[in-house]
Amino acid sequence: MHELLTPLQMKKADRLTIESGIAGIELMHNAGRGVFDAMRQLLHANSRILVFCGPGNNGGDGFVVAQLAANEEFSVRVGLLCDPKALEGDAELAYDEMDLDLTSMEDMRAALDELSEDDVIVDALFGAGLSRPLDDEILELVQQINESPAQCVAVDLPSGVSGRSGAVLGEAVHADLTVTFFRAKPGHYLYPGRAHCGEVVVEQIGLEDAVLKQVGPTASYNCDTLWGDIPDEPGIAGHKYNRGHTIVVSGPKFSTGASRLAALGAQRAGSGLVTVVAREQAALVHAAHLTSVMIRPAERIADFERILEDERLNSVVIGPAAGIGRETQERVAECLTGERGVVLDADALMSFEDNPEDLFGYIAEAGSAGRVVLTPHEGEFRRLFPDLLGRASTDCKVERTRKAAERAGAVVVLKGADTVIADPNGQAAINTSGTPWLATAGSGDVLAGVIGGYLAQGLTGFEAAAKGVWVHGRAAELAGAGLIAEDLIACLPDVVSELAEFMSDF
């Protein structure tokens, strides 16, 4: 269930299901049951439940939840934002079936002030259907809900969060638990909406997986389903030469640490051989630090070209502290010749800040877009793709990463707390692993190396990027608080072991 559906795609999936012969009210009953079953973990014998319903189907789900709770003799109050006569369709049917009187919104808000942490608020106001900021009256209600000590359960999506982009439309409910249906939405995993969702539970309510083919999802959350079939555990008859050879391009002698982090990241990701290519003075610095990673001096661009003539060198990482300027541009252009996979990070990107079209031209000439990966953070992305930044309230990170990948002709990894990976064909994934402690110097260098290591082993650009991002984030989770980049490298073997053990179970 890794696919993600936008609100419009989910609406289409509902419509197709109803057209196939399943009544909409049946889907609503199933949704309400799913919410109530999921919220049991928050309920106590004496819990009071306040259900806030909106005018659409989200409110209809709330009516079903309220009736189910009342059937089990919980103290339940239901408030509705509109006149019941304004309800239509399945929401009207669910309201008519509910054997509970409505409580005025004034009394509902008064009851909010009386709740304790044992009580539960159900947010069935708008869900994913909201497309504009909340008005002032609703804003006040949302703020009051957020100030309550009671646990909050959001139906489908916390009201005020865009299901498409994760944007907060003025203000949004802070839920402890969000229960959505069939498939999650991008807004569940993109910030800032992700921070409003709490635990996300996906309930299956009667839609068949076959509907997905008709809806055509192009986004997912990042998981092993996307990573190809390169095993995490080497074969018994394997050897270092069939696990790939990664080249990492070093910066000058006083800027060598970043490339060493990338080299070790590639090695820990499973690349059979890793070589750092550096100017002679920088190579001497590397020689004092590296043992199993090889070192090749390349003083001039001609020396660099000769090294890359070896077709056994099947991935290259360039950018970590490589230096910004013409020399790096030339080396990037050379890296993009041949059939090797290429990771362009940091200085390799910023060297083209004034002429990004030159970079995209080199990638197009290489004819291997599926094996080229760009890894910008937000600042670097802004410089390469300045026109792809929309208004903060409507900007969708998935859409702009997808557009950037199409323009660049390469896989783009837009880094951040909700890193998005996209390829030129429109496939996109939102990462879910990692911690805020990743915001530390050198962590991006390790990531570039890990992706390069997976490219060396034969994964496509999208597969290598998606797996690399997830593994990198999981290493951060294992490293814990106060991590530095070197800790990520130390934890990578544990992540690889976890993946190998997980895959052995299937």
Image (cartoon, rainbow, N blue to C red):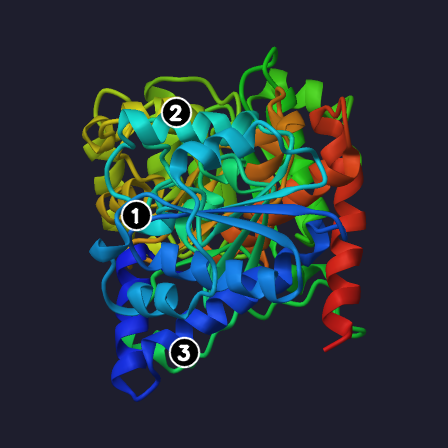
Which numbered disc, 1 or 3, marks the residue that appears first in the sequence?
Answer: 3
Where residue 5 sits, quadrant-wise, is: bottom left
At 32% across and 20% down in the image, what residue appears?
326
**Residue 432 visible, this angle:** no
Is 488 situated left or right of 280 in this image? Answer: right
| Amino acid tagged 2 | Glu
| Amino acid tagged 3 | Glu
Q: Nearer the viewer, mark 1 or mark 3?
A: 3
| Amino acid tagged 1 | Arg
Q: Position of residue 304 (x, y in %)?
A: 46, 34
- Residue matched to label 1: 402
- Residue matched to label 2: 140
Mark 1 → mark 2, Cα distance in angstroms? 36 Å
The reply to whether dot 2 and dot 3 touch (C-beta < 8 Å) is: no
Which numbered disc, 1 or 2, marks the residue that appears first in the sequence?
Answer: 2
Query: Residue 26 shows which numbered tag?
Result: 3
Mark 1 → mark 3, Cα distance in angstroms? 36 Å
Mark 2 → mark 3, Cα distance in angstroms? 33 Å
Between residues 211 and 56, which one lies in front from this camera angle?
56
Q: Is residue 99 above or below residue 148?
A: below
**Dot 3: within a 10 Å radius of its alpha carbon, few (fewer than 14), some, or many (20 or more) residues?**
some
